[in-house]
Structure formats: C-alpha cells, structure tokens
Amino acid sequence: MRSTWTLSLTAALLMAGCGAEPPAEAPPAQESVGTAEAPLDADLAPYFDAIPTFTGNYRVVGTYTPPTWSWGQIELLEGKQRFRTEYYNPRTLKLRDQDTFQSTDYPLRTYFGSLNQQLVNAFNLHYANSCATTAGAACPTPGPTRPEARFALLHKGRKTADRTCDINKTPTLLVHGAIQDANVFLFPNGNNGTGGTYDGAAQLTGMVQDLEAKNRCVYALTFGSFHGDNFNHAIHVANAVQRVKALHTGVARVDIVAWSKGVLAVDPWLANAATWGGFSTTRFFERLAKEQASQVPAYDDSVRVYVPLSGPHKGIDLNFRHPIHTLTIASTASNAPVGRGPMPWTYFSAFQCVTFGYDVPWFKNPYADSVCKGSGGTWPDYFRRIYLSNITGLSSTGTPVSSTSLQTLNTNQGLSSSLFNFDDYNMSLFGAVNTSGKYVTAYPGQLQAAYDLRGTYPIPDRSASAWDNIDPDENRYFPWLDTKLIYNPYNPFFAAGYMQSSDHRVCRTTAFDPVGSPCFAYHAQALYDSVDMNVEAYDSLGYGKYRIMDGLGMAAAMEMGGKFITRLAEHGLDSRLKSLYVLYGTTGGAQPFETDGMTSTTSALRGDGVLFEASIAAMTQLTQGWTSAKKLADAKQEGMAYDHLSMGITPAVWNKISAHFASRD
C-alpha cells in the first residue's frame, strides 16, 4: 500500500466514436432524485460533513486539463451523500509542487511535483483558492490540499478523453490504494515532463497506457485522502461507475481493477454495505459505522469484471507486528517517501529515534526528522516520551477517553511549546482528542483495515542468528535497540542497559496487547539523572525500568474501525457480478516488509511481502452466497510471482487482466 514515491524507491511500485463529445454533467435525473435524510444522533453528527444539498447521487463540479504529456482530463466529482469527515496531517494532505520533499538524491519535486500539482489544481475547481499555486502559501482546511470527503477526482487517459478508444467496449475504472493516487496507474516511476523517470527507471508508463493501447477506455479515481474512510471511498466508486456509464451511453457495465487498500473501497459497494447488520446499538464507533454503511449506494448490476489486486479483504496487521516499520514512519520527514503511514503506538521512547547518529551504517536514514528531530541524541533524553496520541482508552460506551491535551503530554516531556503542532504529532493510528474535545484521526481507513491475524500467522521466535538477514526486526530494529542500550558515555566498560526479555516476541506483541505484553528495557540513566519521570521500577543494580512504547491494542483498533473487516467478512459480493478475478502476489521482492508467514529461512512467504495470503487470496469470502455453478463459471483466483508493490505496475499482470477482459467481451 504505497505511493508513487515509494514505488519509485522500490526500483532503488477500433476508434469507434472518434470525435464524439462526452456528456458534460450527470443526467438531470441523477441530480433530482433522493429522499430526506433522517437526522443523526447528536453525538454522531459532528463526525459527518455538512451536505449543502442531499440528492443521493453526484455532480460534476468541473474539469481540469493537465499538460499534454499527462492525463487527458480530470473531472472533479462531488458526492451528494452523507460523508464522514476526513482529517489530515502533513503526511496525508495532497502535496503541491512546492511541498514535495526532495534532495539531491531524491529529486521528487522534479519527477512527481507536476503530477502532485495536477491533483491540487483539480480539487481546487471547487475551492478556487490562490493558495493552490502560490509558493509558501498555507492552504486552509478544508481546501485543495485537504479536500472535503465528498470530493474525488475522475481521471481520463489521453485516448479516453479524446474519445479515440473504443467507446462501445466495456470501459475500465482503476482504484488506487493507501499512500497512492491515480498517478500510480499512469506514471509509476514519475515523469519530469519530458518522459524522464525517477532514478532512471526503465518503465515509463503504466496500466492506463497499456489498456488504451488495447483500445479500451480507461478511467481512474483519486480520493481526497489515501488513508480515508472506506465507506466514503465506496460511495465514490459507486458514483464514478455511474459517471463512466453516462460517458458511454449504451454501455451497461464497467470493469473495475482495485489495488491494495483500494479493494476496501469496492468490496463494500459490491457487498451491499447498506444492508449489513450486527452493529452494536450502544458502542460509539459501531453506531458511527452503521450510519456510514447506510450511505453506500445499493449495488445495481453495473460491474462486469472485478479484479482485486493483492487487497486486504481480511485485513492487515503489518505495523502491529513489526516495530521497525513504525519506527521508520516516526523518524522520517513528513513528505519523504516512506514516512506517510500510521503508527499503532500512542507514545514511544525518544531513544528509538534515529537522529542519534542517523548516518551510522546499521541504520542510515537521511530523512530523520518529524517528531524524532532532535530527540534521542543525548543520554538524558533517551527515555523522554514522544506522545502521538492522548487517548488512554474507550469509555463504557466506546468513546475515546483522554485526561489531558496532546500538547501538554509532550511539553511535560521537555518539548518546547513553540515546536508543538497538533497535526505534526497526531500520527497515531488511533488519533487524538483535540483542544476542542473532538476525536480526530487522519487514518480512519487504516483503523477499518486493522485486523488481528495472529490466529493464522503467529508471532514467531526470530531471535536465532539465522533470521538476521531475513526478518526486518531482527535485522534492523533489535540490533538498533541493543546498540543504544549498551552505549555508556560515562563508562565505556560498563553496559548502560539491556532488554528485559531476550524473547523478542514480547516487544513484537506490544502493539497488539500493550497491557498483557509490555516492552521494557532497563537502563543506567536512572543512576545519573536527578529527574527521571518515566522510570517504573529498579533492578538490584539500580538500573531503571522503562516502557519503550505503548498503545491501545488491536482490539481497540478494530472497534474504532467499526469492526469493518468483521462485517465485511460476513458478506459475499452481490451474485449479479458477472465475473470475479482475484489476482495476488506470491513473492516478497528484494526486501519484504512482511516475513511472519515464513516457517523457515527457506520457506515461502505465504504472502506478497506486505499482506498475508489469507487476506489477499480471499475468493471464498468474496463468493459466499454464490451457487456452486456460478462460482465455477464466474470466479477464479490466481497467484503471480510478484511482490505487493509490483502487482499494479507490471506488464505481465496487465496482460493477465486484459486477457480476462477479452474473454468476457
């Protein structure tokens, strides 16, 4: 679930109707239908965007024409349903050309800046704010860099916009995943405006050009937030399909290809989310989820072929089980390539920050910044806590509980109040309660995707040296902790500290169960510092006991996600779907992020390097309720020897998809 930036780093992710004009708007009937919306409960209402006019459909706000080397056209669609409000932090907003992180090694402004700017310009069709193109200007919230949840972009390939594809063939809609946008389907390795790619990558173009070369019309969605709410995104998918059908009068259905988290935008619509039951009538987040699900349009037999590419149909727990991934997120500059994900911790000790000698060979990270900047660099600073959330738990009705502000928590730990910014620190998956007393998270879609997969893939014991170059935690995370704990500036012959347990499964389980499996270290800092607020106990030698990180746990994450995966798993896709073709990766690439499926150092991953096979190869779940005859005729599943970040950008995968489309023509 990566962006075009991260995909770039993994490289170091007949002319029928020619001249015909597409309709400029949705048909008038689509603007007038709808019924009065029932009022929300008072405690839920603040969590939904105010809808200027409710009709239950969509409208085309306007169109934006990018440079000739890019998309043919981009439409701004406004959903006329009720949307849950989506919040942003600097890691989730839409980047402008002047905001794009770059250095001499990573000239992303050159290769991705214009592509970023096109998204901002298209969202700005509604906001009409000069901040979109003014260097140094801060765009307001809401605004073109943080669009309201009801807006999405519908991109058209060049041939599609020119109507030089076969408009009578079933068109294709592409749906992106987390940390992505539609540009990943056009230029997976960027474009500097003259055809050059990031880091000299050989692959110039993407799935859009491939399908158009085969005479198919191709559209793609960009959501306002790539970590956004999956029910919101499902509404946009339904609206976009109606818009594509309106552009192809006489075409009854659309083909959909969804990648990674994008499948969680398609599954709920095809599974008729508005009919889901089983939600708690008393727990806050389940009540919220029920209202959200009710807004997803009923599936209307508008999809011919659905191709989910390596998507988390049964959820994901990657960052819960791998501390190194969370640390990398925390210690990476806001707009750098790998720093744009959520963290399952609510606080962590500053000694984990990589800015202490970040150029050392065992953890070279030139992007060490964000909340880690200036932290962990001196001994007295080691066990200062960096708080990413102020939520301590859920109340008896499931609402978030906090005792003080996120700013107070951090300034009490020594942070200058002038350096604190709520958006910069609100990086936890769980979100935080802001100064107005409102719960805010930039990661609602990731909370919905969270699911405990330890029952299928247990946390393995990887402490043996044989795993050092295979498991990312044993290779990087625990050596990093051990090195810093041992270092003693006062007495190089006397180890400064040690891990409480030699069994690294304890710390790896902390994010799942911080109460039952706390991760502790003992350190001599307590012997030298007169003020030490975070020491919890002492051993016989006077070493202080420190909790390395803490969180709310997986059960809380699943509840705060409205038990989305639990509900999704109970419902198959509508049996009117003409064809389901599940494609998924079976290898991890050069550096797999997820290795827990391996039972030996030479075993297969049992996944695609990011997601487990049980989640991505979920045809049985998706076809529940289908007859045996329909399953045999209209559903198939196939693994391909590519990693998660390659499944959407590899020609061999595109050829499989095209062949399946052709078989259904």
Image (cartoon, rainbow, N blue to C red):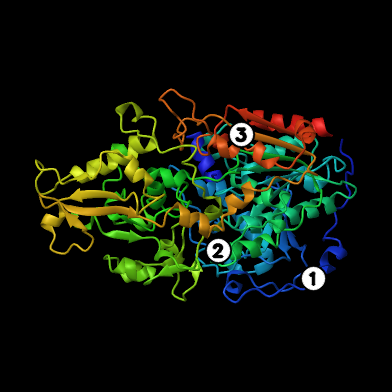
So how many labels did they put on this image?
A: 3
Which dot, 2 or 1, sits closer to the camera?
2
550 in relation to 313, above or below: below
428 in relation to 174, above or below: below
Q: Secondary structure at mark 1?
A: loop
Q: Secondary structure at mark 3?
A: strand
Q: Which of the numbered marks, if any, corresponds to residue 584?
A: 3
Mark 1 Cα-neighbour bin, 10 Å: few <14, some 14–19, many ≥20: few
| Residue of label 2 | 285
User: Is there a contact, CB below 8 Å, between mark 2 and mark 3?
Assistant: no
The location of residue 209, given as percent across then percent down, is 71, 38
Judge by depth and name the residue closer to the eye, 269 or 27.
269
Inter-mark Cα distance, 2 to 3: 31 Å
Q: Secondary structure at mark 2?
A: helix
| Residue of label 1 | 35
User: Is there a contact, CB below 8 Å, between mark 2 and mark 1?
Assistant: no
Task: Of the two numbered discs 2 and 1 on the same chain, state the one appearing first in sequence.
Answer: 1
The three-letter code of the residue at mark 2 reads: Phe
The three-letter code of the residue at mark 3 reads: Tyr
Judge by depth and name the residue closer to the eye, 383 or 197.
383
